[in-house]
Image: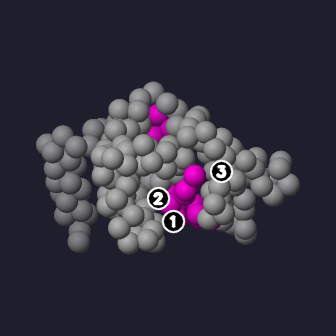
């Protein structure tokens, strides 16, 4: 492809974004992280970004069922450990379907808020806490119970109260009201 063709193609892409109204000029300048095939914009809040991730459809549905959308659109800041759809699929068959029923809203809310720390914690800050704690760090969730963080090699892990470990697979997905760290296992209080 010659230079003129490349410039024309680039112009068409930019115009398509401009006319679609989905990406602003400011967002095109932002440092994004790809999650679930979608760019996560630091200028958008946790919910605005999460709904675009193909890997977090179950989490988004659970947040809606628990009535936590407004909370996670709020000022925060929040640090969210976001399990993927594959993480939810590891749960015993029927667990998710059961949890999203209206009569189980309290339990669902407890589980989801167990994945959230009040405040904004980058992976670097959590690593520093682990190092300062001689290999582990405990941090209190919005739900009220602790998560334990530890590291192995270059990987950061989080352990729930039941002893289940989740690996952080994508760290530091910055949001306007916090940060998301993608994890490979659902945490249970």
Q: Residues within 10 Å of mark 1 (few under 14, many from 20)?
A: many
Secondary structure beneath label 1 = loop
Determine the image quadrant of residue 2.
bottom left
In the picture, measured across the screen, residue 6 lies left or right of residue 187, that is left
Determine the image quadrant of residue 71.
top left
User: Of callouts 2 and 3, which one flags the residue occurring earlier in the amino acid sequence?
Assistant: 2
Q: Are marks 2 and 3 in contact (CB under 8 Å)?
A: no
Front-most of residues 76 and 100: 100
Residue in view at x 62 percent, y 65 percent? 165
Residue in view at x 37 percent, y 45 percent? 105
Q: Can the viewer see residue 48 in this picture?
A: yes
187 in magenta: yes
Residue that numbered label 3 is attached to: 147
Q: Position of residue 13 (x, y in %)?
A: 20, 54
Residue that numbered label 1 is attached to: 184
Task: Give the label, 3 or 1, closer to the camera.
Answer: 3
Q: Are marks 2 and 1 in contact (CB under 8 Å)?
A: yes
Q: Residue furthest right?
A: 134
Q: Residues within 10 Å of mark 2 (few under 14, many from 20)?
A: many
Magenta stretch bounds: 165-189
For residue 83, the mark is 2
Compute the Cα span from label 3 to label 1. Answer: 15 Å
Task: Give the label, 2 or 3, closer to the camera.
Answer: 3
Residue in view at x 30 percent, y 52 percent? 101
């Amino acid at each position: 492809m010659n230079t003129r063709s490349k410039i024309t193609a680039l112009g068409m892409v930019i115009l398509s974004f401009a006319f679609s109204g989905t990406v602003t000029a400011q967002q095109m300048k932002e440092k994004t992280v790809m999650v679930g095939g979608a760019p996560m914009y630091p200028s958008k809040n946790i919910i605005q970004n999460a709904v675009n991730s193909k890997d977090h459809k179950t989490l988004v549905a659970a947040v809606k069922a628990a009535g936590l959308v407004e909370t996670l659109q709020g000022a925060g800041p929040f640090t969210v450990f976001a399990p993927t759809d594959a993480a939810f699929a590891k749960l015993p068959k029927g667990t998710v379907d059961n949890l999203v029923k209206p009569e189980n809203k309290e339990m669902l809310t407890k589980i989801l808020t167990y994945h959230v720390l009040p405040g904004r914690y980058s992976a670097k800050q959590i690593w520093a806490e682990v190092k300062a704690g001689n290999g582990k760090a405990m941090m209190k969730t919005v739900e009220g119970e602790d998560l334990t963080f530890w590291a192995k090699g270059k990987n950061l892990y989080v352990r729930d109260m039941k002893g289940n470990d989740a690996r952080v697979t994508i760290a530091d997905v910055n949001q306007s009201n916090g940060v998301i760290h993608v994890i490979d296992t659902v945490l249970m209080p």
